[in-house]
Each structure stands twice: as C-alpha cells, then as structure tokens.
Image (cartoon, helix red, strand yellow):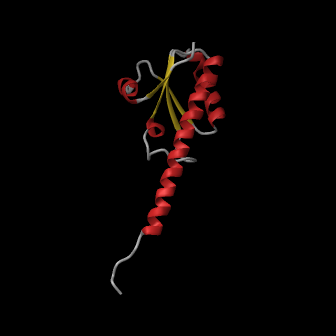
C-alpha cells in the first residue's frame, strides 16, 4: 500500500453541502427582504438592517440559525406585534431589536444589510 488516502468523494460531498447551505442562506435573505416589505405595509418604520449570521457566508445554518433584524423608526407599541409577524412569515425565530440607542447601533449600520421601504 502506498499510504495515501483520497478524500475526493468527501471533498465533493462537503463542497455540495457548502453550496446548498449558501443557496439556503441567499434564499432566506430574499424571503426576509420580502417579509420586511410586508411588515412595512402593516407597521410603519423608516428602515431595517439584516445582520448576524444571515449576512455572513458560511455562518447561517438553515433550521438552526435565527434571523437578526434591527429596525429603525418603529413605534414601541408595534415592537412585539412586528416581531411576531416576522417570525410567522419567516417560520424561524427572529431576533428583532430597535436600532436607536442600541449598543451595537454603529456596527449594525456599518455592517448590516440595509432595507428601506419602497416609495
């Protein structure tokens, strides 16, 4: 025996899994952007940022990861109904935060994926 071991099959499987995971992540971004549009029709707000694992390739795990959204300009009384609305639409846990005054506000504004209502 030569002592070498081929990982070709394993490498192919891992590559396919990475591609599937990335496609699922991109699809969830599309669904989240659509959900934000629907949310804006029900509860007015000025803008939102998607942040966390969903915007970082390789970190979002379909079926396990939540969706992190920072929202700006949402009335306090609309916060919990909005969070529930998004969770129901996305069918995943949503970690919704009010952006104004949040300790991570500057980082989220800089690194998050910005969404603004049409019109």
Name of the residue lying farthest toward the top = 119
Residue at horizontal 38 percent and vertical 27 percent from the top: 104
**Residue 70: in sight, yes or no?**
yes
Q: Is residue 68 above or below residue 101?
A: below
Q: How many badges with numbers are in the image?
A: 0
Whole-percent x, y for residue 30 in the image: 57, 34
Q: Position of residue 79 (x, y in %)?
A: 57, 22
Residue at position x 36%, y 28% in the image: 107
Residue visible at 60% across and 16% down in the picture: 77
Tell which residue pokes out farthest to the bottom in this image: 1
The part of the image, by quadrant, that contains residue 44 is top right
Foreground: 74 or 59?
A: 59
Is 113 placed above or below 91 here?
above
Q: Nearer the viewer, residue 45 or 34?
A: 34
Quadrant into which the C terminus falls = top right
Q: Would residue 83 be visible to someone looking at this image?
A: no
Identify the image quadrant of the N terminus: bottom left
Give percent across and percent down for residue 100.
Answer: 43, 18
């Amino acid at each position: 025996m030569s002592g070498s071991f081929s990982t070709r099959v394993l490498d192919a499987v891992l590559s396919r899994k990475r591609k599937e995971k990335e496609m699922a992540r991109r699809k969830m971004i599309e669904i989240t952007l659509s959900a934000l549009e629907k949310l804006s029709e029900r509860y007015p707000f000025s803008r939102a940022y998607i942040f966390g694992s969903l915007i970082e390739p390789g970190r979002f795990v379909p079926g396990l990861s939540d969706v992190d959204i920072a929202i700006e300009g949402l009335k306090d009384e609309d916060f919990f109904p909005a969070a529930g609305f998004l969770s129901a639409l996305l069918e995943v846990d949503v970690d919704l935060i009010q952006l104004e005054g949040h300790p991570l506000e500057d980082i989220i504004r800089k690194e998050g994926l910005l969404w603004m209502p049409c019109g």
